[in-house]
Amino acid sequence: FQRLRQGLSRSSKELSSNIAGVFTKRKLDEDTLQDLEDVLIRADLGMETAIRITDSLASGRYGKDVSESEVRAIMAQEVEKVLGPVALPLELDLSHKPHVILVVGVNGTGKTTTIGKLAAKLVSGGLSVTLAAGDTFRAAAIEQLKIWGERTGSPVVASKLGADAAGLAYDAFEKAKEAGSDVLIIDTAGRLQNRTELMAELEKIVRVLGKLDPEAPHTVLQTVDATTGQNALNQVEIFRNVAGVNGLVMTKLDGTARGGILVAIAAKHKLPVYFIGVGEQVDDLEPFSASDFAKAIAG
Ligand code: GDP
């Protein structure tokens, strides 16, 4: 919790000082509520949650003096209500052997790093993992994944730069089956610049995996970079439609002033948030806790 609090300190400090600005010796009236709503929207929390918070605050307190700490407490309470239903643990169905996790997201959002951290977590929990270097467009991504493979003692299935990603995914699935791996984690490219091509590639990966197991991929995880702000909402929309995303990892929550976007994404998309990334190191992937996040962002 301390790490999360520290990571979100820029988000919460900015929010607190703006809230303090609204509530200097002012009664709770239409103007203060409007100003507060603006502050919450500027903090990326989203319109829906901003209204929830101001409505909750106004009920019973309209026309009265309210303290900043009271506002923060209500904010934490309402944020937790939004996040509670999406704070779910990642469950693996090991009867599939392997349970296939397809990791998607825009380049630079932290796919490869998250895969490495996740593999380390699973391996230390006693599971065997195979990694597939499906971002066949970037040599660096393939190399990075190989390093994570070495670190975690997980085999990495890779091919030459520019190879067909779906072919590689199929190959990796077969190899993971042969090796008896519990989990297969597949990296993918995230070139949003060429959306049609990306869409075709991801659809093809999903289709070929389904040939070996009609339920695969069992988890489609999207990494979302918290520092992106509002744009993150569209990114989730796109990958949800293209790849059938059914879970999220919010990365780079350390040091961002835009952590509120997680709340807006939860309110809009209602997808499970399995983990949060709070740094670049192997241990910097934490299960997502609604109450910790709510407390950390409310300051
Ligand atoms: P990909 O292109 O989606 O595979 O993204 P990468 O895994 O290569 O990550 C892009 C950059 O973000 C790298 O420099 C990572 O070290 C960094 N990164 C990933 N996750 C986090 C995080 O949670 N916090 C911070 N501060 N950096 C991260």
Image (cartoon, helix red, strand yellow):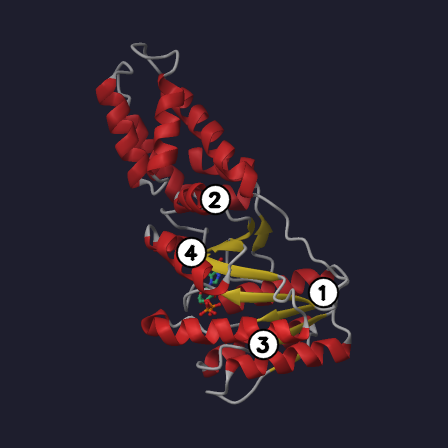
Residue 299 in sight here: no
Earlier-in-chain disc, 3 versus 4 = 3
User: Cα distance, mark 1 to mark 2?
Assistant: 28 Å
Earlier-in-chain disc, 2 versus 4 = 2
Q: Viewer-nearest of labels 1 and 3?
A: 3
**Residue that badge 3 annotates:** 208
Residue type at mark 2 is Gln
**Residue that badge 1 annotates:** 123
- Is the CB of mark 4 within 8 Å of ligand 1? no
Residue type at mark 3 is Val
Label 4 crowd (10 A; few <14 / some 14-19 / many >=20): many
Q: Viewer-nearest of labels 3 and 2?
A: 3
Q: Are marks 1 and 3 in contact (CB under 8 Å)?
A: no
User: Which residue is painted at 69% across and 61% down in the image?
Assistant: 122
Residue 195 in sight here: yes
Q: Is residue 148 above or below residue 244?
A: below
Q: Are marks 1 and 4 in contact (CB under 8 Å)?
A: no
**Residue that badge 2 annotates:** 6
Label 2 crowd (10 A; few <14 / some 14-19 / many >=20): some
**Residue that badge 4 annotates:** 236
Residue type at mark 4 is Val
Quadrant assignment for the N terminus = top right
Residue 88, picture quadrant: top right
Earlier-in-chain disc, 1 versus 2 = 2
